[in-house]
Image (cartoon, rainbow, N blue to C red):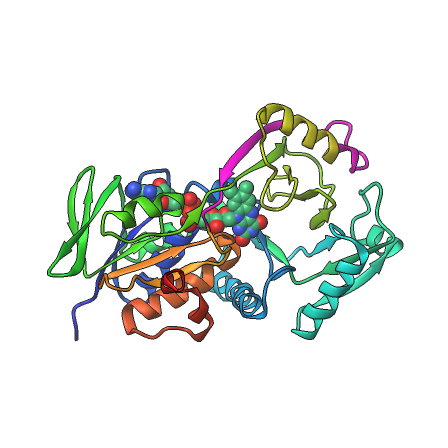
């Protein structure tokens, strides 16, 4: 029997957690290194909508759709993962664009229904100001991001993974191969290193001369105090996306990526919360508890970076927006590629090499 591969995963957000879990389940010896609490940095500040929705080319739609299916597989393998297919009601673009999106995505096999005001009111009876025409996507959902991440890490630990609190300061290279990491607590070596460090990834990659072209746009989300159930699913209204969390908080952003906090984040949060409250019936007692400003780890072309870094053997990179949607597929595919050298065809467009062209 061959010795299990030793893999260091930098990052304990949803991407690092999913990769670590899939690696451990496939027999690798894994050390996760994080300089934040388990649960990550972008991950706790996410809207956490799982979707293969509008605005993406077909190959990316296919990856996202596959990731949605992989969430079901993960929920079966890891009971208790906080996943719900609550559906979405969407009218955040002009009717002609909604129609075009519905026609295109339906032809790709996405389950979209056109609904009128009465049907929309049956789906979300507590909304004020429903439009005459909206789209309902029953197959979209939510995974509560911190609980899902912690469930993955806890199960990975049960299967032998080590979670280490430290800051990675540099990648270590030996004979032209990445052989480990230097950290605030000393050197650690491994057969492979995975960078899944969200917005911290470019600095780590740069220590081996690798450029990760990512942007970090901010996104503000307001959180109410827990409240009685008002929403059944995701609501994607014009300039206001909201949902109710598993603990009963109603959260909202100006879009699912969060509002731009502007110069005065408190004022932006207050205005957003007021707009959200005005859209809800029976919400007199709804109170703003807090807001978050998260920074989205977004490759400059908007698509994920997943794969080996060319010219740096022993190094794998996984940095992306829409990490909540993509996590189960990214974990599965990365583990296969790292351990068996088998790259899933759905990842073909998403290597780092595309930026060199
Ligand atoms: C406002 C907002 C809304 C969003 N909405 C959605 C949505 O609706 N749907 C969706 O699919 N996605 C959404 N996203 C995107 C999604 O949340 C992210 O893609 C995902 O959380 C990224 O996870 P991650 O594990 O890569 O990064 P993170 O959660 O940021 O985790 C990074 C990890 O790396 C560690 N780290 C970093 N640097 C170092 C270092 N030098 N040494 C050691 N550890 C290090 C950190 O401590 C942390 O553990 C949203 C994001 C934001 C901010």
Decide if residue 350 is on the left or right side of residue 272. Answer: left
173 left or right, relative to 74 = left
* Residue 297 % position (x, y): 45, 47
Q: Front-most of 205 and 281?
A: 205
Q: Is residue 297 magenta?
A: yes
Residue 315 point in image, percent of width and height:
26, 59
Quadrant in the rendering for residue 38: top left
Relative depth, front residue between 59 and 337: 59
Q: Is residue 92 left or right of residue 50?
A: right
**Residue drawn at x 73%, y 53% as measured from the top left:** 90
Dividing the picture into quadrants, the one containing residue 353 is bottom left
Which quarter shows the N terminus? bottom left
Instruction: Answer whether residue 13 is visible to the viewer in this image.
Output: no
Q: Is residue 290 above or below residue 354?
A: above
Q: Which residues are magenta?
A: 277-298
Residue at (30, 60) in percent of width and height? 316
- Queried whether the magenta region covers residue 281, the answer comes back as yes
Residue 287 position within the rendered picture, expressed as x and y whole percent measured from the top left: 68, 27
Q: Quadrant of residue 165?
A: top left
Query: Residue lying furthest front in this view?
Result: 357
Residue drawn at 54 percent across, 33 percent down: 292
| Quadrant in which the C terminus is drawn | bottom left
Image-based side of 277 in relation to 261, left or right: right
């Amino acid at each position: 029997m061959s010795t299990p591969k030793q893999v260091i995963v930098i990052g304990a957000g949803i991407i690092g957690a999913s990769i670590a879990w899939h690696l451990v389940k496939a027999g690798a010896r894994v050390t996760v290194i994080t300089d934040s609490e388990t649960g990550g940095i972008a991950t706790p500040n996410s809207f956490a909508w799982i979707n293969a929705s509008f605005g993406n080319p077909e190959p990316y739609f296919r990856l996202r759709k596959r990731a949605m299916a992989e969430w079901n597989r993960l929920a079966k393998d890891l009971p208790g993962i906080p996943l719900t297919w609550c559906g979405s009601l969407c009218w955040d673009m002009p009717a002609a664009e909604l129609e075009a999106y519905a026609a295109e995505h339906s032809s790709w096999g996405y389950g979209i229904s056109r609904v009128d005001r009465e049907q929309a009111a049956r789906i979300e009876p507590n909304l004020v100001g429903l439009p005459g025409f909206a789209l309902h996507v029953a197959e979209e959902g939510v995974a509560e991001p911190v609980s899902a991440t912690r469930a993955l890490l806890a199960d990975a630990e049960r299967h032998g993974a080590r979670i280490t609190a430290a800051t990675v300061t540099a990648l270590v290279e030996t004979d032209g191969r990445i052989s480990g990491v230097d950290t605030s607590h000393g050197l650690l070596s491994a057969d492979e290193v995975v960078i899944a460090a969200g917005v911290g990834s470019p600095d780590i990659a740069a220590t081996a001369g690798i450029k990760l072209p990512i942007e970090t746009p901010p996104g503000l989300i307001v959180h109410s105090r827990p409240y009685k159930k008002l929403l059944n699913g995701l609501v994607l209204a014009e300039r206001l996306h909201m949902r109710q969390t598993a603990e009963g908080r109603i959260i909202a952003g100006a879009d699912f990526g969060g509002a731009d906090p502007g110069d005065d984040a408190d004022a932006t949060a207050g205005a957003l919360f007021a707009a959200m409250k005005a859209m809800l019936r029976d919400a007199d007692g709804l109170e703003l508890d807090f807001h978050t400003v998260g920074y989205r780890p977004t490759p400059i072309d908007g698509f994920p970076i997943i794969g080996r870094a060319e010219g740096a053997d022993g190094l794998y990179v996984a940095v992306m927006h829409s990490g909540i949607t993509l996590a189960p597929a990214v974990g599965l595919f990365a583990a296969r590629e790292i351990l068996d050298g088998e790259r899933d065809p759905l990842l073909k467009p998403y290597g780092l090499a595309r930026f060199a062209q």
